[in-house]
Image (tube, grey):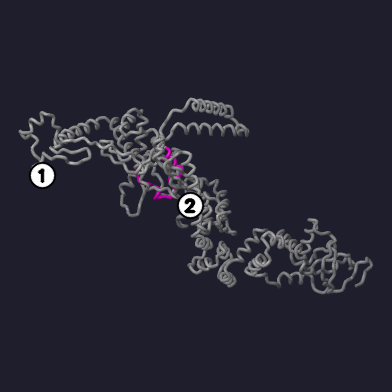
Amino acid sequence: MTTNANTAPVIDNGATVFIPLNKLKKHPKNARKTPHSEASIEAKAASIAAKGILQNLVVEPERDAEGEPTGFYLVTIGEGRRLAQLLRVKRKEIKKTEPIRCVIDTVNDPAEISLDENVSREDLSPADQFERFRELADNRGWGAEEIAARFGVTAHVVKQRLRLGAVSPKLMQVYRDGDLTLDQLMAFAITEDHARQEQVYENLSHNREPWIIRRDLTKTNVAATDRRAIFVGAQAYAEAGGNIIRDLFTEDRGGFYEDAALLDRLVIDKLERIASQVQEAEGWKWVSVHIDYPHAHGLRRTYPQPVQLSEDDAAAYDGAQKEYDRLSSEYESAEELPDDVDQKFGELEAEIERIDALRHVYDAQEIARSGVFVVLSHDGETRIERGFIRAEDEKPEEVDTSETVNDGVRVSGDGEIIEDSGHDEGGNLGSDLEPEDEEAEEDGKPLSDLLIRDLTAHRTLGLRLALGEQPDMALLAVTHALAAQTFYRGVDATCLEIRPTSAHLGGHADGIEDTAAGKALADRHAAWAADMPRDVAELWGFIASLDHASVMALFAHCAALTVNAVKQPWERKPCAHETADSLATAVALDMTAHWTPTVRTYLGRVTKAHILAAVREAVSNEAADRIAAMKKQPMAEAAEQLLAATGWLPPLMRTVQPAWLTDEQPDAPRADAEDAHEASEPEAFAVAAE
């Protein structure tokens, strides 16, 4: 080593020396012109902080125009490590004079050896990388955070690599051999069960899409979006010993609950606790819990009856309503309510709702012999249905023990034949006008069955003729017949032989009764039921006392419950379905108010061709083309975003326009929406594509 005039040391080629960091510069002939990424520098800085610089920098002395050493050194190999150390200086982890171990190279061409370092090497196989990360965790007990700190990556990246490293060695070898893609390997990593991974791999067909692999691996599990998982919650499930499978490579929406049986048990346990609280607080005879509503229970149901509010409650209601109206008027034009006013509105609304609930109550005797179903709704909330009476709890009907005589047959009130004097030995009915009976008739013998039928047949004919001439009264009679059988069970309270039936829709569409439309119908039915008299004998008077509009509303409700437009594969009812279409047109049914195409309701249950056809029809050909190359699941999710505001419906749910309805009328439903919401399309697609 020699020293020049500027006292800069001259170091022999191949020597290893320590040079202060602030004396190192990037070599202008460095082959890398594309800057190192921030992530790369971060990773190198973390590695150096944990393990030091494992590979020497290669440098050559910098010389001025006259060829004299300047005292600085140009980094030929190791520029990334130099930048990493500068980052550590910036973070005040080291000083700018930190000595850096370097090898002097004054012989080789700097550009060539810089290129050689980056070209003449082979990156570590991803499979090896995944397994080595896993070994660090298993052998040294390091968690994801510690490993991340030592390698300058995020903890999430470490978790991903650890999960990949836990894939079955058999499948890892398949990946090394090139028979599995990284996306497919990531799909297998959704679970750490090697046997399950290998089983799914063995059963794969030619279609090995990652989403299919994930679907097959989780088919026995319960998605976190399932109503049962929402109801129980991740914390309670985990505390009970349940394991949640998380997909670290896709948006898994909370993962998958591995033990479905445990989850069901936790649901029942929680429902039973709620049911017990309801029974204790309200006094019902029995409670019954179910995950799904028991549509085939066959029980008669009672409803709460209207009652007068107490003076205190009535006064409290009036006061709360007046204060609510005053505040509404005062802040009518305000764009945003002050916090205290907003809170006051909430308190008033709660008070009004509380008192409103007191206007209808169940009779104490009904509660004492009735029960409650506590079930899980489609959105993961508790659904409480009250007022069901079991057969053994029905009030016994009074038995008439008096005797009646018809056609010479004396019958007791319970139907037992006491004496049959009206038939001969051959069982033939004797004449009603036998001479020897004349004296008995004068003594008050009841009319014979034959005569009763004769007379009442004529009366029936008269009623038919008269009722047919009085439409308003016919409406009243039909409404009475429908209401008697809709709201009362096991009674024969109408002389009109009209028998309404109402098919349960829950068996055809899961969760349909918990939709907004289902709840609206149930609320309407409950409101009418609460107004019905307790005794069906009083029903005629109740309906007759209603104004015309109320009678029409009750008639419409009862008639509506008999509608059945469900199509089933084994049924052949073309005329009925045509009538359903005509009815839909007549009532201007707009299903966009009750149903939207989502992944759950439609898009995830049809083929890709159907999805593309929907987008093509509702949005544009271009939008359909942009998602055409997507896999099924992401395509369905993208389509859901694209169709969200278009009002598109499958053909089965569309209503045909009546002839008198023109396109100029804004309310006309449109089956084709080719240009609908064109302006919002790019934004919707961008969200879906993310």
Return the residue nearer the eye: 66 or 63. Answer: 63
The disc at residue 600 is 2
Residue in view at x 53 percent, y 50 percent: 232
Residue in the image at 53% along x and 66% along y: 197
Choose the circle earlier in sequence order: 1 or 2. Answer: 1
Q: Amino acid at mark 1?
A: Gly
Secondary structure at badge 2 equals: loop
Image disc number at residue 405: none
What mark, if any, has residue 427 been given in the picture? 1
Across the whole image, how many numbered discs are drawn on residues? Answer: 2
Label 1 Cα crowd, 10 Å radius (few <14 / some 14-19 / many 20+): few
Residue 42 lies in quadrant = bottom right
Can residue 68 be spotted in the picture? yes
Residue 228 placement (x, y as % from top left): 50, 51
**Above or below for 122 versus 298:** below
- Of tags 1 and 2, the one toward the viewer is 1
Region rendered in magenta = 502-523
The residue under label 2 is which amino acid type? Arg
Q: To which quarter of the image does residue 434 belong?
A: top left
- 54 or 197, nearer to the observer: 197
Q: Is residue 504 magenta?
A: yes
Q: Is residue 184 magenta?
A: no
Farthest residue to the right: give it: 5
Expressed as whole percent of the image width and height from the top left, the position of residue 547 reads 36, 28
